[in-house]
Structures are given as C-alpha cells and as structure tokens.
Image: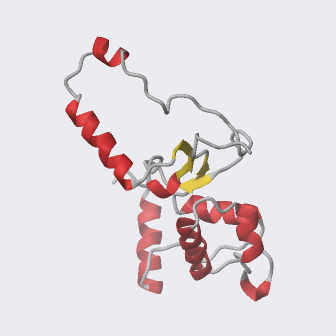
Amino acid sequence: MNVNKTTIFRLRQRLHETDTVSDRPCSGRRRCTTQRQDRNLVRNHMNHRFLSAPASSRQTRGRNDQRISANTVRRRLSTSGLRARRPYIGPTLTQRHRHQSTLWAQKHAAWDRIQLQSVVFSDESRFCIDHAHGRVRVWRRSGERYQTDCVREHDRWVEHL
C-alpha cells in the first residue's frame, strides 16, 4: 500500500472505536451555511445563470439569519463545479434558425476551403451596443459554453429612433 504502518494502525483503531475512518471534526470557524442552503444556492444559479454573487448573497441568509458574503457564495458555487465566466455572445436564434443552420452545414459539409472563402457569414462581426465589454458573467460548468441558457443573445439589427 506504500503507507506507513502507524497510519494503518490508527485507521484500524479509529474504525474499531467510531465505526468510520472519516476525519473527526476539526477546530475552526463553523460554516455559515448548511448543506441544504448550499444546494439551494447552486440550484438558484443553475436556474438563473447570469445572477451575480453579490445579488445572490443579498437574497440568501445563513445560519441564525446572518448575512453571507459574496465570497461565500463564490466558494460554494466553485465547490459544486460552477465558475463565473464571460458568456458567449451570439445572435438571437430561434429554433427554426438553428434547424436551418444545421441543414446548411450538412448540405455544404463536402465543400473545400476555396469554396467556403466565397461565403460571408453575417454573424462574424461583433458590435457592443447595449452593455460594457466583459462585465457580464455566467455561472456554468466546463463544457457548457454554447448551452442555450449560458449564451447571451442579442439582436444585431437594432433600430435607432
């Protein structure tokens, strides 16, 4: 096992005394949220991906009705695998648009590079009209970048009054 003999001896002794080998409670400050509150925080951020940690901390109360900090919210979300990242910003697409794009891609899958260079994709340019660059964050797990509820959609054809 490549472990010291005293480690094995102590683990056997702890198993015999407490029926478990898990660590005993350590000293230190008690967590300000319960496991149930942690699950609620994660569920809330999974339903509202663009909710900020400070806004979530204002809505959530910890044990004994005490306030929790935004850093506490970030730590709880981080342990569940959620990270605050810049969202993918794409055009507003309906289900019909997505279907048409898929059909076009399947139809032209055999095109070579020279043929594709003659095509102009209208969603390649990025213009920032309605928000500051990079300040909006989405809480998501790894691999969820293009998931529908993690994409911040915007309409490029904004009419000016």
Which of 43 and 47 lies nearest the eye of the viewer? 47
Q: Is 122 drawn above or below residue 132 in the view shown?
A: above
Say left or right for 124 vs 70. left
Q: Position of residue 124 (x, y in %)?
A: 50, 29
Residue at image position (30%, 15%) is 113
Residue 51 sits in quarter: bottom right
Specify the farthest residue to the front. 161
Say left or right for 123 vs 117. right
Which of 54 and 90 lies nearest the eye of the viewer? 90
Q: Position of residue 134 (x, y in %)?
A: 69, 41
Say left or right for 24 vs 148. right
Say left or right for 62 vs 98. right
Specify the farthest residue to the bottom. 64
Q: Is 78 drawn above or below residue 63 in the view shown?
A: above
Residue at image position (70%, 69%) is 56
Residue 4 sits in quarter: bottom left
Q: Position of residue 120 (x, y in %)?
A: 42, 23
Which of 9 and 59 lies nearest the eye of the viewer? 59
Q: Which image quarter holds the N terminus?
A: bottom left
Residue at image position (72%, 45%) is 131
How many numbered tags mark residues here?
A: 0
Q: Which image quarter holds the C terminus?
A: top right
